Each structure stands twice: as structure tokens, then as C-alpha cells.
Image (cartoon, rainbow, N blue to C red):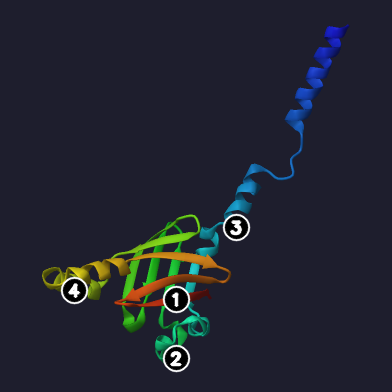
Amino acid sequence: MNINLLILCGIIIITTSCNRPTDASPDSNQDALNNNSISTQLIGSWTLDLETMQDNAPPEIQQNIEMLSMMGGDLFKIDFLEGGIVNETGLGGMNSAGIWVENGKGVSVTFEPNEMQKEMLERAKESSPEMVIEIQNQLQRDIQLVGPHLIFEFSMGPRKLTFYLTKF
């Protein structure tokens, strides 16, 4: 009789564990993770938040940001697309395309050189290796998602400007 009782208890335990309802299916758990991932929050169009940039810029750059404000904030836009594609529309109509990948705290973006950068690289190869390095550095960006902003630093020569982008 003890063996029959053990077998019955084993069947009940196995049946109960196999049919136990769960709070969330694995698919909905994955959806929740995806909705909180950087990728999900990143996909879309981002433009300059000039007010935040001005509040956080060093005094020597404030005037440049004020001029951008007068020209309109939609002069610079980054579109993050699914599949790791990124398109940037910059000041002066210069466009760049590249790829992005999550890197833990944010994303790493690598752009292909646009036409102007290609010309600058060709000229700099012969005369200025430092310029080549600077241009190549501009094609690589680490971007962080902090609250409602995408933030990255962009340096030209000795000056650095922190870009704050907001989603629209």
C-alpha cells in the first residue's frame, strides 16, 4: 500500500507541475524585456534639444547654439531603424548612413563617410594624418539613452560639444 501511495503522490506532483498556470508566458516575458530594451526605445526619429544643449554647453559654444536655435532645431536629425540601420541628416544637407548596435548602456554607431568626409579623407591622407584620425573618430559614436534624451559627444579639434537629442 505504501508503494501505491508513493506512486499516486508522484503522479499528482507531476500532473500539477506540468499543468501549473504561470503568471506570464515566455513570449510575454520576452515582449516585456523587448519593450524595456534600449533598441525598442531607440527606434524612431530624434532631433536636437537645443534648450537642453544650451543649458549644458560651455560658455564659448553658447552663441553657436543660439544661432542654431534661430535657424530651427530640425536641422539635425537621426533616424534609428530596425535592423541596426541609422540615417543622419546633418547641417548643410549632408547625410550619413551607418549601423548601430547595443553596447550595454547605450548604442555604438558607425557611419560610412559622406561625400564631404570622403573628400576630406582623401586630401588629409597626403598631408595630415591627424586630420584622418579626427574624421574617422567622427564616424564612430557611443550614444547613451538618459531619460528622454539621447546623448553623445562630438569633438572638432580641441572643443567638445555634447549633443542632446529628443524623440519626435
User: Disc 2 marks which residue?
Assistant: 66
Question: Distance from label 3 to label 1 (Cα)?
Answer: 23 Å
Question: Up-down: is 5 above or below 98?
Answer: above
Q: Residue furthest left?
A: 126
Callout 1 amino acid: Phe
- Estimate the spatial distance between the alpha carbons at disc 1 and disc 4, rounded to whole Å: 25 Å
Which residue lies at the image location 27% right of the left edge and 66% below the top edge? 136
Q: Who comes first in sequence, dot 1 or dot 4? A: 4
Badges 3 and 1: C-beta atoms under 8 Å apart? no
Give the structural element (helix, strand or loop) at label 1.
Answer: strand
Q: CA distance from mark 4 to mark 2?
A: 30 Å
Q: Which residue is mark 1?
A: 163
Q: Nearer the viewer, residue 31 or 33?
A: 33
State the SS at label 2: helix
Q: Amino acid at mark 4?
A: Glu
User: What kind of residue is marked 3?
Assistant: Asn
3D distance between C-alphas at marks 1 and 2: 14 Å
Q: Is residue 31 left or right of residue 1?
A: left
Q: What residue is shown with label 3?
A: 36
Which residue shows up at 24% across the image and 67% down it? 133
Which residue is denoted by mark 4 in the rendering? 119
Depth check: 71 or 150 in front? 150
- Residue 12 in the image, given as x and y percentages of width and height: 81, 22
